[in-house]
Every structure is written in structure tokens, then in C-alpha cells.
Image: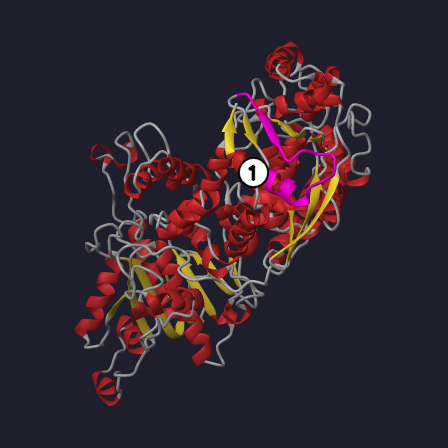
């Protein structure tokens, strides 16, 4: 590098070169990358090597200059913002000088978002996106998993938008509290503090329906979220008023303290933000301005001031990222030039055709006029000459789509030509396309990879087949099952694969895209009609059918006003038709619930049997009788036959909107229940090849006399995607587990015959 600098300065000595060996010299490195992201990743590995091999090299001895800093700032944050807890030794503190330091700052962005809340509709999306700000998460002790749990609660509570009815009225809309934050939070709080089943007949408390899913340690999470919401609502009220400049300074100090915890990554932005506020006060005092200003005027000032002042200059104790024209000429031990692409530097200067100053008619460009290309060449020369120990240059020189070569900046080409003319050996390092390429970890170059995750991937690349393997090919180690709750057993067979991911691996997958519910319902959403019918049926069984409308309205699933009443009446009519075929005595002559405490093959099964009558179990379902519901009813019948309660016939009858079903007493319920329990235990250690819909198809075909091949073929048709329907293979859980492979193997066939065939044989449609 020093010989290159001497050449550029015109003081290079050939005799000195002859005495100096350049074979092991690594002070000059040029890297050809596939993308901007790979450029930054290569730089990160280079700096880690430099700090490891040069103990006297400090963080602020490194300058990284980039022509287009705005474009590279997101990549810099993505690579350099590693988790300090998991990879602390690999974390390099850095500072981005220039406007993008503010634009990418969670502190500045969060502050500007909060200052906009006077104009908010307070939709779910606005509040939850703000809650995921990294600094706000620290202030209120939120984690990503906790916020996912809160999202689920908000779905149950029916929160859509608006603080309360008064807030909606201020926006020129009816003052309805339905689907607002206040009502939703009240439902969650009541569900946490009220005793369960405080009013079994009509579980409304002052017209509010509690959400009964929050207990134990989850109440602490709920209290933290309520504090966050209350703080946000309070600031919404405070920010609607106008204040003097001095008052705004105090208000913003209080706002920052209420919402943010400043970490070391944002300390510099925080200090310079406070400096902006001090400057604002000083300017108003010097101008004699003492009028009040509103929050919109403050936001305009902050946007203009932050973009020009926050993040400028040089930071001490960090690696400095800057634009090419900032800090040029200041000496640094290590200088890195990124993004020297053919179309980025020197800047392409295109004059508009209507610019008369550049027109040849009036003389055009004259000698002595400023030339931007020459200025940028001089800036590059200044930067190169300011490097004291090493120079690093990178550019995007390969097309990431087809691998074709892309020329570098003309300045890089001239630099390489200059090295060749004076016999300075320099090789352009061809960086790999992917971070997990094995070459990144098998070389002794200055770009040796340090990412442990990519290293683990690189270690196994090329060892597998072209076909993606299933996620699991052998069982995992789990604790031996000694106790099963009845509700957990029946819930398991609703979706064994989801249960395995959630309970054995702690992985939660959603079936559909998690779209934000930012507007109140104008119609019944997916499955809302089923839930409204279920509410109507439950209230009718309790003898209070007139309360079902109030219950459904309190749930937030009905549209407001008359449309909601009409939709509920339609579902109520469906339930009334279902109950017409039921003897009224069956609804009132109900026996007390019987506790279940069975021991089968060393496993304790506990629970409660309900809906018992002297004639047996009568189960009313306000929906179609699906295959997974048949499995649940069959398990209930097996437990009834095992418990053998006195005064109750061993008969289970199901009445639904589609088919009825009757199970009579069977001779060997313990043996049949043991098969289901064993399959449950197997499903804790591996994905159980049981799918209620497919297993019923397969077993029913066998019962109809078809051979196993045709029965399996019928099941495969429902597993794969069809022309007008989506098969089981495309469900997110199955796609995640099986990766395109079919689980309909010998184990599936055997399991379907052992579990479903007895159910079909014992069941009788009515």
C-alpha cells in the first residue's frame, strides 16, 4: 500500500521495491462481490481479522467511506447489529455519520411516530408496530414472543381501532365503544381478575364479556401492555395542545423517558437529538419568538433538523461509516472503500437539455469551471493517501442472477492499472455469492468467515440429496408421559402435527397470513358464524336464549347496529331449527358432571364427563360434524364406557347441522382407549402420521370392501393439491414438517386401521 501511495505521490523508488518482499503483504486488498449485502458481510469478516491480528488497531482507527451511504445503511445495520448476548466477541461497535443515521434510528423513528399520534385512528397495526420498536420493547419488557401472545389476546378481545367512543366521535363518527382499545383491554383485565365462571349462565360483567385465557405469569405481561397503552393514550391527549418552545423541550424529555431505554447503539443519536432541542430553544430565544406552536410544526422542525445534523462528524470508540466527502484527508490506520461500482463513483453527471448554462450555444463548459468527476477523483486520492497501514476496496462486480461480470468504477480500474505498471502484485479477491459457501471457512485469506451459523451450514452442504428431507427422520428425546388431561388428549387429535411443533418443539405456525384487523367488522369473518351459533346454543341449553345477542355483541364479532342484529338472528334461527328435533327434557334433565380418573398402561387420565343423562351422553354441535369432531366424540364415548357411571347408559348420541351419530356400549373400551393413548405418547416424540380427514377416507374405503392400494390412493388425492382445492400438503404445519414428502406410508395405514376402523364399525348414522 505504501508503494502505491508513493507512486501516486510521484516519489516511488524502484530500488526500494527490489529490496522489499511483497509476497506476504496484505496491506492492499480489492474484493469483487455479488451484492451490497455481501460487500458488507465481507467487510465485517475483514475487520474481525484485522482486530484479531493487530492488537494495536482500535475501533476508531478504521474509516469506511461509501459513495451511496443511504443505500448501504440498512445492510450495515443488518450485519453489524448482532445479538450482544449470543455473539458478543464478534460484535463491532459502529457509527453511521450522515442523514441515514437518523432515518434508520429506532430512537428517532420512534419519537417521530409518537409525535404523529394526535392524527392516529389508533388501529391495531399502528399500536403493535410501535410496540415492536426495539427501545420501546426494552422500556416495557416486551419480547417478540410476548407481543405475539398479545396479538392473540387482541384477536380474542375483538380490538380493531379507536381509543374509545369519544375518540371515534372526535373523528366525526358515531360514539360507539365496540371494537375499541378501552373495551378490549377491559375484557382482558376482567378475564384476568374475575373468578372463572363467576356467572355461568350469562358471563357478562356490566355488559363486558371477559376473555378467560389469562392467568398466572401471563397477568404480568398483560399489566405491562396495559401500562404501555395507557401511556400512549395519555400522550395522545397531551400532544393535542400547543406549547412554547421551552415547554416542548421539557415535554420531549419526558416523552423520551416514558417510552425509550437508550442503549449503547443509540447513545450518540440520543445526545445529538438533545443537542437539536437545545439549538431549537436557543434559536427561538435569539429571534424573540415566544408564541405557542403545535406538534405538527415541531415535527417539521425535527425532520428538517435531524436530516442535516444528527449523525454528522466522527465518533470515538467505534468504526466510522461515512460518505466519500466526509473526513477525507484525515489519517486512519485502516481505510475501507465500499460500493465503488461503475455507476456509483464517480457520480454520473447528466445535465438536462434545457440547461442553457451548459448549452454549446452560450459557450458550454469552459476552462476553469468546476468538474464534479475531477472533484470526486481528488476526494478518492485524498482518502487513499490518508490510509496509514492498510487499504480495503470492494465493489459489486458480479451479477447475482446470472454470474456475469460487471465492471468496477473507472477509478478502481485505474488503481489496478497503476499497480500493474509499477509491478505491485495485487489480486482481486472473488468473494462467494453466499455466506454459507465452504470457501469462506477453508481459506487463510483476510476474509475468513466468522459466522457460526453459516459455518454449521457450510459443514453439511453437498452431503444431502437434491430432494429436501423431512424435518424429522428419527424421534426426539421427551419425558415419559405419566399423566394426560382429557381436554389435551382430545385437542391433540384435532391436529397432531401442530401439537408436536407447539408442545414438543415450541414452534408456532399460523395457517393464514396475519393481516391486521384495522377496521370494525361489517360482516361475519371466517368461523365467526360458527362461534355465534355456539354461543346461541350454549345460552339456549342454559335456558336463557334471549341473552345470546348481548353475548355476541360483547364479543365484538358482530357488526354494529341493525346489520349485526340481523346476522345474529339468522344464526339464531339455525340453532332453533337444530333444537326442534331435540326433546326439551334432554336439555333440562342433565346429571351432575362426573370426574374421570383412569389408569391405563401406567398412565393416569383425568378430566370431567359432562352432558350426561340417564339415557347416556347427548352432544349438540352447532356446526357440521367434521371428522376431527367424530374422533373427539369417540374418545368421549370410550371414557364413558371405561368409567361406567351409575345411572347412565353407555350410549353417546350426537346431533349436528349435518349428520347424527350414535355409539352404543362396547365390550373392550380399555383396549381401544389404550391404542389412542399409545399413539398420543408416540406423537410427543415424532410427528404422528395421523390426519383425521385422510385416515377416515382410508379406513372407510377399507370398510367398503376396496383394497388397500385404492384406499391409499383416495387418501393421496386429498393429501395433494387439486385443481379447485388445497390439499393437506399445503397447510403450513405439514409443509414445514414434511417438506414435500408424503407421510402416507405403512405407519399411516396401520394407525388408521387401529384407530379409525373400530370407530366406523361402532358408529351408526342417524
**Residue 639 is covered by the magenta coloring:** yes
Q: Where the N terminus falls, by quadrant?
A: bottom left
**Left or right, 157 with reference to 426:** right
Give the residue pinned by disc 1.
Answer: 634
624 vs 466, left or right, is: right
**Image coordinates for residue 657, horizontal then vertical, percent:** 55, 21
Q: Position of residue 238 (x, y in %)?
A: 76, 33
Does residue 242 appear in this view? no
Q: Quadrant of residue 549?
A: top right
* Most foreground residue, 382 or 435: 435
Is residue 349 placed above or below 29 in the rendered structure? above
Measuring 29% from the left and 70% from the top, which residue is drawn there?
439
Residue 523 x/y as whole percent: 56, 18
Residue drawn 56% across the image and 68% down it: 317
Furthest-bottom residue in this view: 19
State whether residue 752 appears in this view. yes
Nearer to us in this view, 230 or 171: 230
Where in the figure is residue 609, as x and y percent of width and height? 70, 39
Looking at the image, the residue that sits furthest to the left is: 421
Q: Is residue 527 above or below residue 268?
A: above
Question: Which residue ends up furthest to the front in the rendered image?
Answer: 667
Magenta stretch bounds: 637-657
Q: Quadrant of residue 64?
A: bottom left
Residue located 32% across and 62% down the image:
394
Amino acid at each position: 500500500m505504501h508503494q502505491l501511495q508513493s507512486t501516486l505521490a510521484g516519489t516511488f523508488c524502484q530500488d526500494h521495491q527490489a529490496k522489499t518482499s511483497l509476497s506476504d503483504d496484505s496491506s492492499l486488498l480489492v474484493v469483487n462481490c455479488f451484492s451490497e449485502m455481501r460487500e458488507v458481510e465481507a467487510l465485517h469478516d475483514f475487520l474481525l481479522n484485522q482486530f484479531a491480528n493487530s492488537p494495536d488497531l482500535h475501533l476508531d482507527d478504521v474509516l469506511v467511506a461509501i459513495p451511496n451511504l443511504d443505500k448501504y445503511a440498512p445492510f450495515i445495520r443488518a450485519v453489524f447489529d448482532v445479538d450482544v448476548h449470543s455473539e458478543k466477541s464478534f460484535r463491532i461497535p459502529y457509527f453511521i455519520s450522515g442523514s441515514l443515521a437518523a432515518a434508520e434510528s429506532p430512537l428517532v423513528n420512534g419519537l417521530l411516530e409518537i409525535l404523529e399520534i394526535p392524527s392516529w385512528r389508533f388501529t391495531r397495526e399502528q399500536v403493535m408496530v410501535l410496540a415492536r420498536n426495539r427501545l420501546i420493547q426494552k422500556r416495557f419488557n416486551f419480547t417478540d414472543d410476548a407481543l405475539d401472545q398479545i396479538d392473540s389476546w387482541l384477536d380474542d378481545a375483538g380490538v380493531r381501532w379507536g381509543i374509545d367512543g369519544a375518540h371515534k366521535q372526535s373523528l366525526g363518527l358515531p360514539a360507539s365503544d365496540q371494537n375499541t382499545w378501552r373495551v378490549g383491554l377491559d375484557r382482558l383485565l376482567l378475564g384476568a381478575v374475575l373468578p372463572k365462571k363467576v356467572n355461568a349462565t350469562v358471563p357478562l360483567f356490566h355488559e363486558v364479556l371477559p376473555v378467560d385465557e389469562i392467568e398466572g405469569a401471563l397477568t404480568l405481561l398483560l399489566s405491562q401492555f396495559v401500562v404501555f397503552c395507557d401511556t400512549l393514550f395519555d400522550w395522545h391527549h397531551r400532544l393535542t395542545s400547543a406549547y412554547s418552545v421551552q415547554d416542548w423541550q421539557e415535554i420531549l424529555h419526558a416523552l423520551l423517558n416514558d417510552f425509550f431505554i437508550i442503549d449503547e447503539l443509540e447513545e450518540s443519536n440520543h445526545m445529538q437529538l438533545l443537542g437539536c432541542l437545545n439549538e431549537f430553544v436557543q434559536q427561538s430565544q435569539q429571534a424573540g419568538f415566544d408564541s405557542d406552536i403545535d406538534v405538527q410544526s415541531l415535527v417539521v422542525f425535527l425532520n428538517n433538523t435531524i436530516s442535516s445534523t444528527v449523525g454528522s462528524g466522527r465518533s470515538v470508540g467505534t468504526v466510522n461509516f461515512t460518505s466519500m466527502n466526509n473526513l477525507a484527508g484525515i489519517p486512519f490506520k485502516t481505510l475501507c472503500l465500499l460500493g465503488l461500482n461503475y455507476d456509483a463513483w464517480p457520480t454520473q453527471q447528466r445535465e438536462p437539455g434545457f440547461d442553457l448554462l451548459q448549452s454549446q450555444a452560450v459557450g458550454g463548459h469552459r476552462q476553469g469551471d468546476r468538474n464534479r468527476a475531477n472533484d470526486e477523483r481528488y476526494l478518492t486520492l485524498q482518502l487513499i493517501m490518508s490510509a496509514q497501514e492498510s487499504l480495503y476496496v470492494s465493489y459489486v462486480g458480479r451479477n447475482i442472477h446470472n454470474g456475469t461480470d460487471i465492471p468496477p468504477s473507472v477509478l478502481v480500474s485505474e488503481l489496478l492499472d497503476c499497480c500493474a505498471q509499477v509491478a505491485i502484485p495485487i489480486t482481486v479477491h472473488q468473494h462467494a455469492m453466499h455466506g454459507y459457501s465452504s470457501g469462506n471457512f477453508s481459506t487463510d485469506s483476510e476474509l475468513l468467515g466468522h459466522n457460526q451459523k453459516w459455518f454449521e451450514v457450510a459443514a453439511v452442504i453437498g452431503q444431502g440429496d437434491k430432494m429436501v428431507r423431512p424435518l424429522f427422520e428419527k424421534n426426539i428425546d421427551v419425558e415419559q408421559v405419566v399423566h394426560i388431561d382429557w381436554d389435551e388428549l382430545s385437542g391433540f387429535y384435532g391436529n397432531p402435527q401442530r401439537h408436536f411443533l407447539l408442545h414438543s418443539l415450541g414452534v408456532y405456525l399460523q395457517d393464514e397470513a396475519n393481516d391486521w384487523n384495522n377496521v370494525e367488522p361489517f360482516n361475519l369473518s371466517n368461523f365467526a358464524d360458527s362461534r355465534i351459533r355456539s354461543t346461541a346454543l350454549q345460552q339456549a341449553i342454559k335456558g336463557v336464549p334471549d341473552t345470546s345477542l348481548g353475548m355476541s355483541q360483547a364479543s365484538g364479532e358482530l357488526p354494529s347496529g341493525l346489520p349485526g342484529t340481523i346476522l345474529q338472528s339468522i344464526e339464531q334461527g339455525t340453532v332453533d331449527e337444530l333444537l326442534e328435533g331435540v326433546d326439551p327434557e334432554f336439555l333440562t334433565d342433565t346429571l351432575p358432571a362426573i370426574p374421570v380418573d383412569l389408569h391405563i398402561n401406567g398412565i393416569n387420565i383425568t378430566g370431567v364427563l359432562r352432558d350426561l343423562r340417564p339415557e347416556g351422553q347427548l352432544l349438540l354441535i352447532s356446526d357440521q360434524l367434521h371428522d376431527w369432531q367424530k374422533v373427539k366424540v369417540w374418545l368421549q364415548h370410550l371414557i364413558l364406557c371405561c368409567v361406567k357411571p351409575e345411572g347412565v347408559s353407555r350410549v353417546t348420541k350426537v346431533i349436528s347441522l349435518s349428520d347424527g351419530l350414535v355409539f352404543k356400549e362396547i365390550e373392550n373400551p380399555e383396549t381401544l382407549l389404550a391404542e389412542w393413548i399409545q399413539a398420543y405418547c408416540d406423537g410427543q416424540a415424532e410427528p404422528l402420521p395421523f390426519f383425521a380427514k385422510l385416515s377416515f377416507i382410508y379406513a372407510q374405503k377399507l370398510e367398503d370392501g376396496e383394497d388397500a392400494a385404492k384406499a391409499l390412493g383416495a387418501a393421496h388425492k386429498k393429501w395433494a393439491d387439486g385443481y379447485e382445492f388445497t390439499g393437506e400438503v399445503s397447510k403450513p404445519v405439514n409443509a414445514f414438517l414434511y417438506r414435500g414428502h408424503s407421510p402416507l406410508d405403512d405407519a399411516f395405514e396401520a394407525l388408521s386401521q387401529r384407530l379409525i376402523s373400530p370407530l366406523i364399525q361402532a358408529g351408526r348414522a342417524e
